[in-house]
Amino acid sequence: MFWKKSPCAVLATLMVIRLLAQVDRNILLGFAPQITGGLAINNAQYGFLVGAVWVLSYGVMAVFLGALADRHSRPRVIGAGMLIWGVCTIASGYVQSFEQMVAARFLVATGEAALVPAATALLMELFSEKRRGTAMGLFYLSIPLGIGCSFLLAGTLGAAHGWRTTFHVLGIAGIVIGLPLLFMSDKRSNHAAQERATPLKQQMAAVFAELRSNRVVRYTVAGFVLAHLVYPGISFAQLWIARERGMDPATIATTMGVMQIVFGSLGALAGGVLSDRLAPRFKGGHASVLVLLMLVCAPFMVAYRLVPTDSPLFYVGMAVGIFMLMSLYGSATTAIQGAVPVRMRSTVMGCSMLLLNLFSVALGTFVVGSISDALTATGVASPLTHVLLVSDILALVLGGFFFYVAARLKRESTRAMPAMGIKV
């Protein structure tokens, strides 16, 4: 198709869509004090809203819509998802209770689940192997920009017009951008029969068989999922700093917005570029790059939770934590999708998103909220500080361990495959 002749233009378009999706998804974080107060919800309910509610829809639908994107037009799948999330984001601005917000955000997540599996598979097709890490890093650049913009919107437009109006504006933008995508077809290459997925049941069976046999991919996915145990720290950041560090919520929103934009963007770009530059030099490939990134960042992330807000280490640690999480995306996505057959790239990415959202986002945020509520009830001082510190350490230790195992398996396969034809 004519639009595939300009890969950079396709990447730029997907970046804009991903940016809007991230703002839409994370706007709850920027308005956390206002929404929890306005809807009278506690920490556990808030954790459920930003975690489990999203997973129950986004995670499951990412697998289904990933399989759909492997079989049909990827732009049309993305466009249909945008219409769903746009309408439901508008509806989010009218809710009057916790239950209504749960229902609205559940459907928003359903629409947004179409984007990542379809978009990453499309970028893997359009860019050469030497440029895929950078392309993925640029695509995921929209995550810190989106999180940052959500906090900035909360501190500017939200402060002036309220969170409900902000939801309405975001929903309208999603509908306007999504409509043209419904008219774009997606003809594959001359090997279309090999590149298109089988019907859903056979496709899922093939994907599970691939994950069982391909240990490098399996451990890379595990490391990527567990590294996201730092996500509760992002979800509860504004509540933590306002309640336990005594800073003004509006000031926090603006500060975190700038931090996300600057250091998250640097992380996404650096991670993508380093993935293309260093992975060919390491016998462990992309997994070795992931281990290196986590080792360098770990000490600063731990210090961030322990020092006072007037210490330079507080802001350095915040910046490094944001940088670290975003730096993983380019290498991890390229490693996962580059090691599976073309016909199942979107489906495998959908499975990765399901696991990530289920264990790290939903379970992680709900557990952090529940434990912090329990500690508060028993009179423990600074409960969120204790719980978020443990969550960060688990992410660094477990995520780094599984990346290390994946790197070792990659090194072993590199030595063994030429002589024995071993598949890992």
Image (cartoon, grey):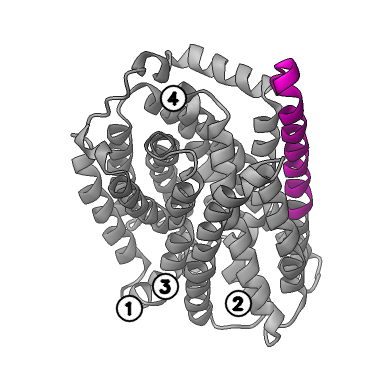
Identify the mark at residue 242; answer none if there is no mark.
Answer: 2
User: As shown in the figure, which amino acid type bears the numbered disc 2?
Assistant: Ala
Identify the mark at residue 160; answer none if there is no mark.
Answer: 1
Callout 2: SS: helix
Circle 3 residue: 152
In the displayed image of the protein, which residue is found farthest to the bottom?
Answer: 310
Q: Mark 4 or mark 3, which has the lower sequence index?
A: 4
Looking at the rendering, in which quadrant would you find the N terminus?
A: top left
Instruction: Check residue 367 for magenta coloring.
Output: no
- Within 10 angstroms of label 3, few (less than 14), some, or many (20 or more) residues? many
Q: Quadrant of residue 386?
A: bottom right
4 vs 3, front mark = 4
Instruction: Check residue 402 for magenta coloring.
Output: yes
Q: Mark 3 or mark 1, which has the lower sequence index?
A: 3
The Cα–Cα distance between marks 4 and 2, rounded to whole angstroms, is 42 Å
Q: Mark 2 or mark 1, which has the lower sequence index?
A: 1
3 vs 2, front mark = 3
Instruction: Locate residue 232 relative to residue 380 in the image: left or right.
Output: left
The Cα–Cα distance between marks 3 and 1, rounded to whole angstroms, is 12 Å
Q: Which range is magenta? A: 396-424
Q: Mark 3 or mark 2, which has the lower sequence index?
A: 3
